[in-house]
Amino acid sequence: MKAYENISLVKLKVNGETRDVAIRPADTLLRVLREKLGLTAAKPGCENGDCGACTVLINEKPVKSCMKLAVEVDAGAEIITLEGIKNSIIQETFLEEDGFQCGYCTPGFLVNAYALLKEHPDADDKLAKEWLESNICRCTGYEGIRNALKLAQEKLK
């Protein structure tokens, strides 16, 4: 539905809530989440799909929101941001195992690890590494992240 020239009014289902948002065709999902909806956990790291700091879930699949135009997200799609998975086991274990250093990459890692645990709760080290390779930690906090994932797997059993 067109509201103004070059502006579209879209419905986005984010963290279980349907929101009407006025967007431009070039607005990325990351910018819409942060600037229009106030959901700032997803971070603008590289903004070219390399670092994974902006990872969100669309229909339970990890997506780099800096690479997805908001107009591409189907109105029926479920978008989950880190704000939508608060108090999850993976968040608890990241705290317990020091799965972060500066914290900038943490939201992307948490969302990605959350999705991995849902889809493959018994993922072996190889599969976990494959899933988490799409995220980069510039502070080299990988050991804590791996330990947090393993502890979350244990707690889920």
Image (spheres, rainbow, N blue to C red):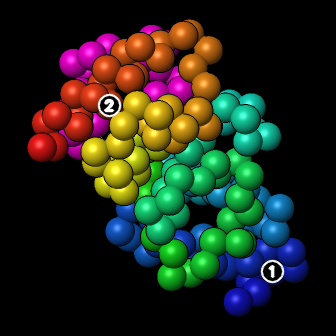
Which residue is identified by label 2? Answer: 149
Q: Among all residues in the image, which is located at the extreme right?
A: 5
Q: What residue sits 62% from the left and 15% below the top?
A: 138
Which amino acid, mark 1?
A: Tyr
Q: For residue 105: magenta?
A: yes
Observer able to see residue 83: no
Task: In the rendered view, tell whether residue 62 sits above or below residue 75.
Answer: above
Q: Nearer the viewer, residue 152 or 1?
A: 152
Which amino acid, mark 2?
A: Leu
Along the polypeptide, which appears first: circle 2 or circle 1? 1
Question: How dense is the environment of label 1, judged by Cα within 10 Å: few (below 14), some, or many (20 and up)?
Answer: few
Observer able to see residue 16: yes
Q: Nearer the viewer, residue 13 or 34?
A: 13
Q: What residue sits 51% from the left and 82% below the top?
A: 76
Which residue is identified by label 1? Answer: 4
Q: Which residues are magenta?
A: 87-110
Give the side of residue 85 with respect to residue 110, left or right. left
Count the marks: 2
